Amino acid sequence: MDTQTDHSNSRSAYLNRNLWSGALFGLGLAAFIDETVFHQLLHWHHFYDKSTTNIGLISDGLFHAFSWFASIGGMFIIADLRRRNAFWLKRWWGGMMLGAGGFQLYDGTIQHKLMRIHQIRYVDNVIIYDLIWVMISLVMVLNGLILVFRTRKKS
């Protein structure tokens, strides 16, 4: 068996692990960006806005820890895949887009609109912010699905 065949066999044996590593990292990255930009720098909202500011800050800390653990978990899986010569960047990137877009879509629909634990911003015309948030998430999910679909077979 030549090196090219070995590499292809490793890729196909670890398709799901590449996908899940990317999804975990993407989820953590999107949560990290959300927490850093919208919670800490802009002060637009906290993770949980239905209580006091102190509770909001505690919820932000827990949310930030979650994003950190998700990112680190994804990176540990990458390290294992690289050690096995089975890391597939294109498939991982598809998983990353699915994770980031999925998180953002969940946040924008479930947490913002159904649970109402926070909004993107507390302004009269929040629908513009909501539409931009959900559209960006849908673009990421669509791009992720395309990449995952293209890498579903052995290559």
Image: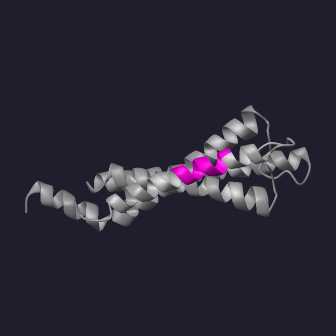
| Chief secondary structure of the magenta portion | helix
Q: Could you tell whether 124 is left or right of 90 in the image?
A: right
Q: How is the image coloured?
A: one colour
Q: Nearer the viewer, residue 85 or 109?
A: 109
Where residue 13 sits: x, y (%)? 28, 67
- Residue 106 part of the magenta-drawn span: no
How many numbered tags mark residues here? 0
Q: Could you tell whether 83 is left or right of 147 in the image?
A: left
Instruction: Tell me the quadrant of the picture where the N terminus can be found.
Output: bottom left
Q: Judge whether residue 142 can be spotted in this image.
A: yes
Where residue 51 sits: x, y (%)? 91, 53
Q: Nearer the viewer, residue 136 or 39?
A: 136
User: Residue most toward the right?
Assistant: 52
Instruction: Tell me the quadrant of the picture where the C terminus can be found.
Output: bottom left
User: Residue most toward the top?
Assistant: 41
Say above or below: 62 vs 123: below
Where residue 57 sits: x, y (%)? 81, 45
User: Residue most toward the left?
Assistant: 1
Quadrant position of residue 123:
top right
Where residue 74 sits: x, y (%)? 47, 53
Q: Judge whether residue 22 can be spotted in this image.
A: no
Q: Which residue is found at the position 73% from the left and 43% from the top?
A: 129
Q: Could you tell whether 82 is left or right of 35 in the image?
A: left
Q: Which residue is found at the position 31% from the left and 53% from the top?
A: 88
Q: Which residue is found at the position 30% from the left and 53% from the top?
A: 83
Q: Which residue is found at the position 52% from the left and 55% from the top?
A: 141
Quadrant position of residue 32:
top right
Say above or below: 149 vs 56: below
User: Which region of the structure is painted magenta?
Assistant: 132-139
